[in-house]
Amino acid sequence: MQVPTPPLKGMKALVVGVANEHSIAYGCAAAFHQLGAELGLTYLNEKSRSYVEPLARNLDARFLLPLDVSTPGEMEAVFERIAKDWGRLDILVHSVAWAPKEDLQGGLLDCSAEGFGKAMDVSCHSFIRMARLAAPLMKEGGTMLAMSYHGAQKVVSNYNVMGPVKAALEASCRYLAYELGSRGIRVHPVSPGPLKTRAASGLKDFDLLLNEAMHKAPVGELVDIMDVGFACAYLATPYARRITGGTVYVDGGVHIMG
C-alpha cells in the first residue's frame, strides 16, 4: 500500500512565539512537523530558551534563534539565517502579543498612550515588519498566519486594549493579503477560542472566559493548541490555495453564538 506524501513535505516554516509546550505557536510547530514541514523556531529571551530548546529538539528544528520583536536587529538576523540555510520560506507564523500589565488589566479609557503604542508595535506592527522580510523569501508563493482573537470583532470583557490592537492586526492581514496576492502569498488572521496559555493568564478573570466559552461552543468543548495547529497547516497547503485575507475561526463555533 502506498503511503501518502505528507501535505507539507519539503516546506520550510518559521514559527515565531513558542514559549512552552502549552503555547499556540507550539501547536502550530508540532502540526507542521507531523505533516512533513522543516521548522525554524524562535525564543523570546534567555529565560524562555530553557523551555523552548527541548521542544525544538523534539521537532527536529533546523534552527532556534532569539527574537524579541522590540529589539532592533534581531528580526533581521532571523531572516538572514533563513536566507542562508534555506534560501526560501514557505510558511510564517506570527504568534506574538504583549501589553504592559497595568494597561492590559485596566479599562481602555485608562490605557496610557505609551502602553497602547507598545501593545500595537509588538502585537501588530511586528507582523507587518516580519511580512516585509518574509515576502522576498517566498519566491514561489507562501502562507503567512497571525494569531488574533474574537475580541477583535466583538467586545469581550476584560480583553481591554488588546481588542483594538487585534482588530488592527486583522485589518493589517487583509491589506497584506491584497498587496501580496499577486505574488502567490496568502495571509490569514487566525482566531482561536480561549486557551490556557501563558499569555492568556495575564487577562483578568480568564477562567470565567474559558468556562463561558465551553458552555457556548456548539461542539460542547474547548479547542486545544493542536486544533489550531492543524487548521493553520491546512491553510498552508495547496488545498487552501484560494483562501486569503478573511479571519479563520478555530473556536468550536463560539463566535457564532449570541
Image: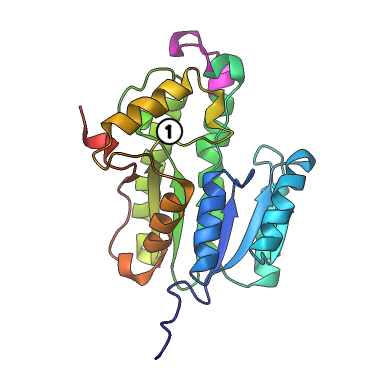
Measuring from the top left, give residue 161's x and y in whole percent: 47, 21
Q: Is residue 240 left or right of residue 48?
A: left
Residue 110 painted magenta: yes
Q: Residue at x 34, y 30 (%)?
A: 213
Residue 3 at least partly seen: yes
Q: Residue at x 37, y 28 (%)?
A: 151
Farthest right residue? Answer: 46
Frontmost residue, 22 versus 24: 22
Say which quarter of the image contains residue 257: top left
Residue 159 at least partly seen: no
In the rendered view, tell whether residue 148 sits above or below residue 165.
below
Say which quarter of the image contains residue 69: top right
Q: Which residue is mark 1?
A: 166
Residue 124 painted magenta: no
Frontmost residue, 1 versus 67: 1
Task: Read off the magenta span.
Answer: 105-116
For the residue marked with disc 1, what is the amino acid?
Lys
